[in-house]
Image (tube, grey):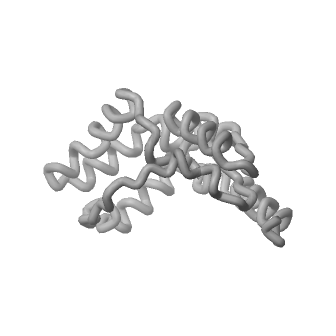
Amino acid sequence: MGAVVGGMPYSQHFLDRGNVLGKPLEKGDVQGAISQASQDKYLIAPGNDAAKKRMVDLLSANPQDLTRAYFELPEKPALPRLREIPIPTQVLVGDADIPDVHGHAGAIEAGIPRARRVVVKDVGHMMYLEKPAEFSRLVTGFIEQNEDGR
């Protein structure tokens, strides 16, 4: 869901957006980061105000999720190895997600022999908050259709 793949470049727009979202955290301003995230048009699609409020509530209740130090692993580009994935794969992307995610989803679909991309209408990057019932239906349906993994 909203996947990106290591080894595929990002646009300057994507990188600039990430810098804007992360800027408040550089100063330890968690509430500023939450406010910045709530204004991002790609995380929650316009008009999904209840999902936006839920996202803000979750981030506010769990500020450690924004301040935890992560140890970055050396990048191991997956893009050239996608063809090695032998199992059915569903790639979900919201139609209002950032264009880079759409490009990466297309590359994942093209690279994995048994992949299928589904674009969910009227959602951004956090479709599970915006349309939880549809998200569950898509995931559950995919699992049930592919229970044997063949």
* Number of numbered callouts drawn: 0
Residue with the most extreme top position: 12
Q: Quadrant of residue 136?
A: bottom right
Residue 108 position within the rendered picture, expressed as x and y whole percent measured from the top left: 61, 44
Q: Residue at x 67, y 49 (%)?
A: 112
Q: Is residue 80 toward the left or the right of residue 91 in the image?
A: left
Q: Residue at x 52, y 31 (%)?
A: 99
Q: Residue at x 31, y 32 (%)?
A: 16
Q: Is residue 136 toward the left or the right of residue 97 in the image?
A: right
Q: Is residue 146 toward the left or the right of residue 35 in the image?
A: right
Residue 8 position within the rendered picture, expressed as x and y whole percent measured from the top left: 46, 39
Which one is nearer the viewer's eye here, 109 or 144?
109
Which one is nearer the viewer's eye here, 14 or 122?
14
Whether residue 30 is visible to the viewer of this picture, yes or no, is yes
120 to 141, vertically: above or below:
above
Q: Residue at x 27, y 53 (%)?
A: 31
136 to 121, vertically: above or below:
below
Q: Is residue 76 toward the left or the right of residue 99 in the image?
A: left
Residue 4 position within the rendered picture, expressed as x and y whole percent measured from the top left: 50, 46
